[in-house]
Amino acid sequence: DAGVIQSPRHEVTEMGQEVTLRCKPISGHNSLFWYRQTMMRGLELLIYFNNNVPIDDSGMPEDRFSAKMPNASFSTLKIQPSEPRDSAVYFCASSLLSTTGELFFGEGSRLTVL
Amino acid sequence: QQQVKQSPQSLIVQKGGISIINCAYENTAFDYFPWYQQFPGKGPALLIAIRPDVSEKKEGRFTISFNKSAKQFSLHIMDSQPGDSATYFCAASLGTGGFKTIFGAGTRLFVKA
């Protein structure tokens, strides 16, 4: 079974550039989450979707961040313009609304902004 | 009120010893308390979880103890092995489907051979 698929795995970019991270959730899952992991702040929930609808984006740091889920099998997290403090590992996770609450994480996208 | 506090930050245990990681929460509406294990370069993966109507759950060498009145829960790893060396996160969430799962800061466990 394919798990949550994230791309790119690594991204190095320069300050001011646009960054787009992609996520394909597990087929059949109807909740999708974006987390950011840093040494200083741990795992922070940025936004989550239920049935492709954004439910809570209170964790999105600022207007430079945006997330979309155009369909059940694809989501993007965009940072424009990127800043060095955005350097982190970004994880996408999916789950099934009707079950226990287990999150299935992808392997993450490591972003470095120079 | 949404925080989950985890300690210790790091832990070194001898092979065969017991590893204990503690967490505390504030929001009594949380109804699902999972522990996730993360290896370097990988995403977190569910290890074991408990609901607040149960005081203890055991799966193999891993046990969660849950104290609802104190709003605390802990992970015990019995007979710790070098392969258990990883970062462990406690978490708390509201409702099914992993609604708004809040993670603790993580504990880096190293098991010495």
Image (cartoon, coloured by chain):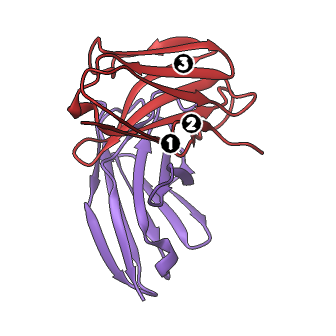
Chain colours: A red, B purple
- Residue found 73% across the figure and 42% down from its top: A2
Which mark is drawn over residue A49? 3
Q: Label 2, label 3: how many angstroms apart (C-alpha)?
A: 16 Å
Badge 2 marks a residue whose secondary structure is strand
Residue furthest to the right: A1
Q: What is the three-letter code of the residue carrying label 2?
A: Gln
- Residue found 41% across the figure and 79% down from its top: B18
- Residue B70 point in image, percent of width and height: 31, 48
- Evaluate whether label 3 is on the same chain as label 1: yes
Give the labeled residue for mark 1: A9
Q: Label 1, label 2: how many angstroms apart (C-alpha)?
A: 7 Å
Among the two numbered marks 3 and 1 on one chain, the one whose residue lies closer to the N terminus: 1
Chain bearing tag 3 is A
Chain bearing tag 2 is A
Q: Are marks 1 and 2 in contact (CB under 8 Å)?
A: yes
Q: Label 3, label 1: how many angstroms apart (C-alpha)?
A: 22 Å
- Residue A41 point in image, percent of width and height: 25, 41
- Evaluate whether label 1 is on the same chain as label 2: yes
Instruction: Say if B32 sits above or below A60 in the image.
Output: below
Q: Give the number of callouts.
A: 3
Instruction: Say if A78 sits above or below B102 in the image.
Output: above
Give the labeled residue for mark 2: A6
Q: What is the three-letter code of the residue carrying label 1?
A: Arg
Among the two numbered marks 2 and 3 on one chain, the one whose residue lies closer to the N terminus: 2
Instruction: Say if B26 sits above or below B44 in the image.
Output: above
Name the image quarter holding residue A30. Answer: top right
